[in-house]
Amino acid sequence: MKRALLVGINYIGTPYRLNGCINDVVNIEAFLKTTGYTEFIKYTDDTRDASKLPTRNNILIGFLNLLKGAKAGDELWFHYSGHGVLQSDTNKDEVSGQDSCICPSDFTQSGFITDDIIRANLAVKVPAGVRLVIVLDACHSGTGADLRFKCDDNSYLKRGVRSPKVFNPDDWLIRQTITELQNYSTTRGDVFLISGCSDNQTSADALIQSKWAGALTHSFLALLKYNPNYVWNTFLKDLNSFLKVSEYSQRPVLSCGNTKVINTKVL
């Protein structure tokens, strides 16, 4: 089984309006279909069907339905495009003292979904032998699922290569740092998170080639279409380098539930 939960929120009719998040969901779904995904749970705020709106309750139900019946050998995907915020950490498990949160369409009434909730209701419930990829195209999302291992990328241009206008992976040398976050246990399943940026950064909602998209989602898809055989650490290098060449300041972070999966394939 290959099943995906896709959430895209443009916050239509509110002061918090975004433009590219629903497009991100459309583009991710189209891509995942080419890789064998056949089951999709989608929440966007351009529908009149209340059961398909990206409310806090519906997203939590989505977590349950994403995991339902999952067994060894299955692949799961959770993609979120929308606002992300920081709030004070109340259970004292964050080194920074702040929780990373995603913002459901009804967050002004129902509140945020914190990284603690994503961990407890999704990441730690993935069974052994099941693979889950989480993509959070949101501000302040670097540790958005509170996974045990965090990989930050500081890859750099080779000596003699001037600031390029076109991305070439061979122009960049890999330099990464893995941090073990002792407050979080390892996960039973193979859980990965790619964030839109570090916890202290913002992620761009951008007009790219005359179409709105999240800069992270656009770059993510461009690279996987270019090379479907990426392993995670090389993918992170190229993702950050691609964004640098595209003149975005955000720096995606890779997190995983256990270290043995850092060098496994993305797809």
Image (tube, helix red, strand yellow):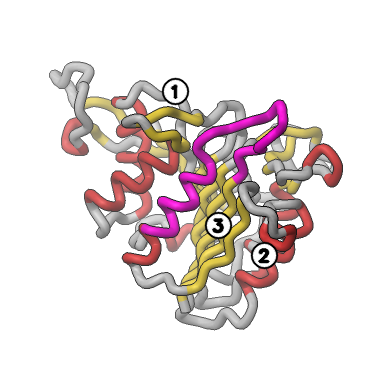
Q: Position of residue 42 (x, y in %)?
A: 58, 60
Which numbered marker is on residue 63?
2
Residue ID for mark 1: 249
CB under 8 Å between discs 1 and 3: no
Q: In the image, is residue 81 part of the stretch drawn in magenta?
A: no
Discs 1/3, front: 3
Q: Residue furthest left?
A: 160
Residue position marked by numbered label 3 in the rendering: 6
Give the spatial CA distance, label 3 vs label 2.
10 Å
The residue at 61%/62% (across/down) is 186
| Whole-percent x, y for residue 144 in the image | 62, 45
The stretch of residues the image draws in magenta is 9-30
The mark nearer the N terminus, 1 or 3, is 3
The local secondary structure at tag 1 comes to loop
Which residue is rendered at x = 38% and y = 45% of the image?
220
Q: Quadrant of the C terminus?
A: bottom left
Amino acid type shown at disc 3:
Leu
Q: Earlier in the sequence, mark 2 or mark 1?
A: 2
Q: Amino acid at mark 2?
A: Phe
Q: Nearer the viewer, mark 2 or mark 1?
A: 2
x and y percentages locating residue 216 in the rendered image? 44, 38
| In the rendered image, the vertical position of residue 114 relative to residue 246, given as above or below | below
Disc 2 to disc 1, C-alpha distance = 31 Å
Structural crowding at the residue carrying mark 2, measured as other residues with C-alpha within 10 Å and reported as few (<14), some (14–19) or many (≥20): some
- State how far apart marks 1 and 3 are (Cα): 25 Å
Which is more N-terminal, label 2 or label 3?
3
Q: Secondary structure at mark 2?
A: helix
Q: Amino acid at mark 1?
A: Ser
